[in-house]
Image: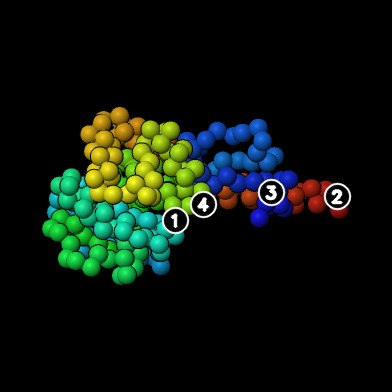
Amino acid sequence: MFEGQFSPELNLALFANAMCVPKSDWPRNTVITGFPFYDKKDNAAMEPALQRFLDEGPAPLVFTLGSAAVHIAGDFYRESVRTAQLLKRRAVLLVGSDENRPKEPLPEGIVAFNYAPFGEILPRAAAVVHQGGVGTTGQAMRAGIPALVVPFAHDQPDNAARVTRLGVARTISRREYKAERVAIELRELLRNPFYMRRAQQIGHRVRCENGAAFAVDLILDRINKRRSTALRSVA
């Protein structure tokens, strides 16, 4: 896990430049590319029922646990429903699978779907609550909306700390994820204009990057240089 993963020729840091600046102890030839966004699971589009919900009222809160933490959701979605009720806000729960759907009927103004493309739903949200995975973090940044991050494991606490320092998010621990506390955090995100202003600024910066294309260009450039060197040595 800790040896042999860095190349002497090129190392791609697949996240936005806004996340951090290069450090002196990074591997040589490391380049920050920007996020390589991909959110079209099986090329699925947004469900018509979700599209109608978004069209019929104010921007909702979005609650999601990404692609990993969703498998150990616990009471996350139940507390999320209570949070939306306390705030009197419309909400979308992206639950990943039917087993995470709340057992009781959802209140009016709150809907649940297994999946939706983040690139389509998050720009239409008022704020997002998520687990801090790098993909979800990048999508929230690109959408230019405030986020409340609830890190579970792995890189998620680090991502949460970075976006919190950027001023685009607040962080709450998993054990503190109770509706009353979550509502306090979201009220601050929604009412304090600093968070939306900062989120929009960072969102513009992230949207100006094309991580996947830049990464491909860097790889092709390295391949072409090696090919040219090989041809010169043969000649």
Residue 85 or residue 60, whichever sits in front: 85
- Residue at 33% over, 35% down: 200
Residue 130 x/y as whole percent: 36, 50
The residue wearing badge 2 is 233
Which quarter shows the N terminus? bottom right
The residue wearing badge 4 is 154
In terms of secondary structure, where does tag 2 sit? helix
- CA gap, disc 4 and disc 2: 45 Å
In primary-sequence order, the first of circles 3 and 2 is 3
Residue 129 x/y as whole percent: 32, 48
Task: Tell me the amino acid under the disc marked 4.
Answer: His
Residue 227 or residue 69, whichever sits in front: 69
Tell me the crowding category of disc 1: few under 14, some 14 to 19, or many 20 or more residues within 10 angstroms, Cα based.
few
State yes or no: discs 4 and 2 in contact (Cβ < 8 Å): no
- Residue at 41% over, 64% down: 71
The residue wearing badge 3 is 6
- CA gap, disc 1 and disc 4: 20 Å
In primary-sequence order, the first of circles 2 and 1 is 1
Residue projecting furthest to the top: 194
Q: Nearer the viewer, mark 4 or mark 2?
A: 4
- CA gap, disc 3 and disc 1: 24 Å
Residue 129 or residue 143, whichever sits in front: 129
Task: Tell me the amino acid under the disc marked 3.
Answer: Phe
Q: Nearer the viewer, mark 3 or mark 1?
A: 3
Task: Tell me the amino acid under the disc marked 2.
Answer: Ser
In primary-sequence order, the first of circles 1 and 4 is 1
